[in-house]
Image: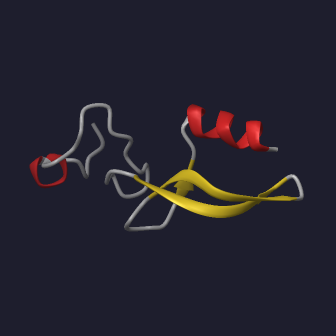
Amino acid sequence: MPAKTGPKHEHGLKAGALLCPVCCVEFREIQVDMEWEGKVLHNVKILKCPVCQTETFTPEQLKDIIGQN
């Protein structure tokens, strides 16, 4: 596990939780409006770090985005 992950950080993690590689805290799923290939998509689910604001997608979320386009 990353050096920053210890009992303080592991408390409350769900099994299979995705951790931010920068902060080692669990990503939160949020909904956003975003532009993808010149088209505005509404209520897209993404993952966002509550600490450093890094955003990413799960493979399933990316499939949903591509499917909306």
Q: Quadrant of the C terminus?
A: top right
Q: Compared with residue 26, is residue 15 higher up or lower down, i.e. above or below?
A: above
Q: Position of residue 16 (x, y in %)?
A: 32, 31
Give the residue displayed 75% in from the left and 36% down from the top. 67
Task: Give the image quarter of residue 43.
Answer: bottom right
Query: Is residue 46 or residue 3 the one in the foreground?
Result: 46
Give the residue displayed 87% in from the left and 52% down from the top. 37
Task: Give the image quarter of residue 33.
Answer: bottom right
Q: Residue furthest right?
A: 38
Query: Is residue 43 or residue 30 the one in the foreground?
Result: 43
Q: Compared with residue 11, is residue 50 higher up or lower down, i.e. above or below?
A: below
Q: Position of residue 65 (x, y in %)?
A: 70, 43
Q: Quadrant of the N terminus?
A: top left
Render colour scheme: secondary structure
Query: Is residue 5 or residue 39 the one in the foreground?
Result: 39
Q: How many marks?
A: 0
Q: Position of residue 56 (x, y in %)?
A: 56, 50
Give the residue displayed 76% in from the left and 38% down from the top. 66
Q: In the image, is 26 to the left or to the right of 44?
A: left
